Image (cartoon, rainbow, N blue to C red):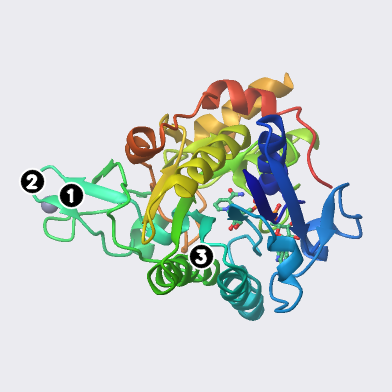
Amino acid sequence: MRVLLTGAAGFIGGAIGTALVEGGHEVVGVDLMLPQAHGSAEAPEGVLVRDVREAGGWGDLLEGVDVVCHQAAVVGAGVKVADLPDYASHNDLGTAVLLAAMHEAGVGRMVVASSMVVYGEGRYLCAEHGRQAPPPRAVAALDAGDFDVKCGVCGRSLEWALVDETAPLDPRGAYAASKAAQEYYVASWVRQAGAAAIGLRYHNVYGPHMPRDTPYSGVAAMFRSSLERGEAPNVYEDGAQMRDFVHVADVARANVAAMEAVVAADAGHWATYNVASGHPVAIRDVAEMVATGTASGLAPNVTGQYRLGDVRHVVASPERARTELGFSAQVLPEDGLREFATAPLRA
Ligand SMILES: NC(=O)c1ccc[n+]([C@@H]2O[C@H](COP(=O)([O-])OP(=O)(O)OC[C@H]3O[C@@H](n4cnc5c(N)ncnc54)[C@H](O)[C@@H]3O)[C@@H](O)[C@H]2O)c1
Ligand SMILES: [Zn+2]
């Protein structure tokens, strides 16, 4: 395949580029080298500095391209209200401009990076009342150290269940809203242009070259940085929050599988997939696994503190990607997270 890869200098884009080249594919890599992601670093070799929001000049870049792998985005939790225009501009306008340019150039296949954040809360079951969408947790309960989400009918603690791709989208923040909007733009382009696309909803991605701890970087990187400073990693709530941590090499493999599938797909095809390890872990265990890899002897510090915006559990079902894309993650979190403790990070 000949692939136009956006966000090619990023944490995940870099791993996808490597996987594509190793698979004998041709890569045209573009990246804006956003200062908030890269500081003043130069573009890696072979990556063209280019803003996806810029309308002109796509003809040559898209010449002979079989599929666009769209990873470029402003990432993170959306910490400040002032970040809203950045999410809307880079993520949504950027996607819209790219889709229009692809249509113009006659390129009709895309894989787009989405995220588990489009789901909002995970899925919960009450022993008596079945599936429940929990109301927000009460501050008084959180203050008292009761972190479970409760059944809206009977008030009992809910058990977590696997989120599959049929779950309704419920983005809760600016970044999440921009990722959901990207999916909607791509789906509408598929219908209007007679194109085909796949959206990959990554869960918690970690691995070599992950950005260092900023307010936007993943919790695994923050645990690692605390350990490097000789401090115990701080874990919010009671540490029992369940997540799925998926290694960046597996995310790259999922992208290659999705590109191969979408190139072969019929016009009008649009599907989304969770990209997850299928081995859910509690956040406290994540801290422990990273700590094990550092030989620091430091145990996680479970603080009981909480952030009102946090969801309690989000655990993915990896089934659809397995049956339809033939993708299963190869790296177990206990191996990958231990190794991550000493892997190189992006400055
Ligand atoms: N890291 C995760 O855990 C995670 C989870 C779910 C989804 N994602 C998604 O995966 C994709 C890649 O994220 P990442 O973790 O590699 O982040 P990253 O910041 O390392 O990479 C994103 C890249 O996009 C580039 N970029 C941003 N705006 C651009 C623009 N207008 N034009 C061209 N390039 C631009 C940045 O310079 C950066 O190199 C994103 O779409 C993100 O939303 C990441
Ligand atoms: Zn109930």
Query: Can you tell which quarter of the image residue 86 is in?
Result: bottom right
The amino acid sitting under disc 1 is: Arg
Q: Which mark is residue 179?
A: 3
Task: Identify the secondary structure beneath mark 3.
Answer: helix
Residue drawn 66% across the image and 80% down it: 82
Name the front one of labels 1 and 3: 3
Task: Identify the secondary structure beneath mark 2.
Answer: loop
Mark 1 or mark 3, earlier in chain: 1
Q: Which mark is residue 128?
A: 2
Crowd rating for badge 2 (residues with CA inside 10 Å; few <14, some 14–19, many 20+): few
**Ligand 1 under 8 Å from disc 3 Cβ:** yes
C-beta proximity under 8 Å, tags 1 and 2: yes
Q: Residue furthest left?
A: 128
Of 245 and 46, nearer the camera is 46
Residue 171 seen from this side = yes
Residue holding disc 1:
156
